[in-house]
Image: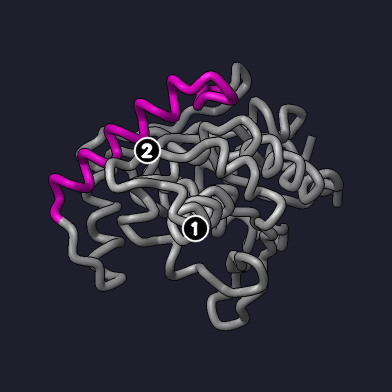
Amino acid sequence: MKRISIAIDGLSASGKSTLAQGIAKALNYLYVDTGAMYRAVALFALREKLIDREGQLDEEGMKASLQRVYLTFRFNPGTGRGEICLNGRNVEKEIRSHEVSKHVSVVARVPEVREKLVLAQQRMGSHGGVVMDGRDIGTVVLPEAEVKFFMTADIEARGKRRHKELVRRGRSVSFGDVLDNLRSRDRIDSTRDHSPLVQADDAIVIDNSDLTIEEQFDHMMACVQQVLNA
């Protein structure tokens, strides 16, 4: 059976990762969470005090420090997925904090950061058999992917998902703060000069505001099987 590349892009908290993981598991493909890579860089910037109290990033300092950022994925048999490691240490829990979420977009819009991570992502997806999710997978990272999805949902639905996720992880954050963060990330992601969040012309758009995970999964798998069977 041929092994293809599947790109899943979309807004923050639109359910990309959940669906990408499920599809990768069903196909026995590699799953690459590119958002985790940008979150890990944001965590690095916070630890290095490259982001001030007002949320402003020292871009020159970030560029100068990039050579000290080494990212890998380590398979966790307990969860059945790869978890992000920053300079050899597993930071999967740390990168899901609200503090990192607040600052990931200001880090991700730095061209040098994106160039470094895009090259790594392209290497991971160069031989097919991969499901990759993020903001610019279908347009920049894997423009030749055989199947592309673009996930969207209204901001209330996305806010409820993100807030529920954070509460489940033991984070104390208000629903209002989550919505504010999503609005800010949407604005930054869609207006940045370098690799903005845009829908690929040949992407299959899925508005999952009122869809269950099962409904989305079945529809997406049907699209994938159609390509695999062609």
Q: Secondary structure at mark 2?
A: loop
Q: Residue at x 33, y 43 (%)?
A: 211
Q: Residues within 10 Å of mark 2 (few under 14, many from 20)?
A: few
Q: Percent position (x, y) of residue 100? A: 39, 54
Which residue type carries mark 1? Answer: Glu
Front position in the image: 146 or 88: 88
Q: Earlier in the sequence, mark 1 or mark 2?
A: 1
Q: Percent position (x, y) of residue 139? A: 64, 25
Residue 182 among magenta residues? yes
Vertical order, 75 against 205 (above or below):
below
Quadrant hosting residue 143: top right
Q: Percent position (x, y) of residue 180? A: 21, 39
The main secondary structure of the magenta stretch is helix
Q: Residue at x 44, y 23 (%)?
A: 190
- The magenta stretch is 174-199
Query: To which residue does mark 2 refer?
Result: 56
Which residue type carries mark 2? Answer: Gln
**Left or right, residue 46 beside residue 6:** left
Q: Residue furthest bottom?
A: 78
Q: Residue at x 62, y 81 (%)?
A: 77
Separation of residues labelled 1 and 2 (CA atoms): 13 Å
Front position in the image: 148 or 212: 148
Q: Percent position (x, y) of residue 64? A: 65, 44
Residue 98, labelled with which disc?
Answer: none
Q: Residues within 10 Å of mark 1 (few under 14, many from 20)?
A: few
Residue 48, labelled with which disc?
Answer: 1
Q: Residue at x 49, y 58 (%)?
A: 48
| Numbered label tally | 2
Confirm whether residue 225 shows in the render.
Answer: no
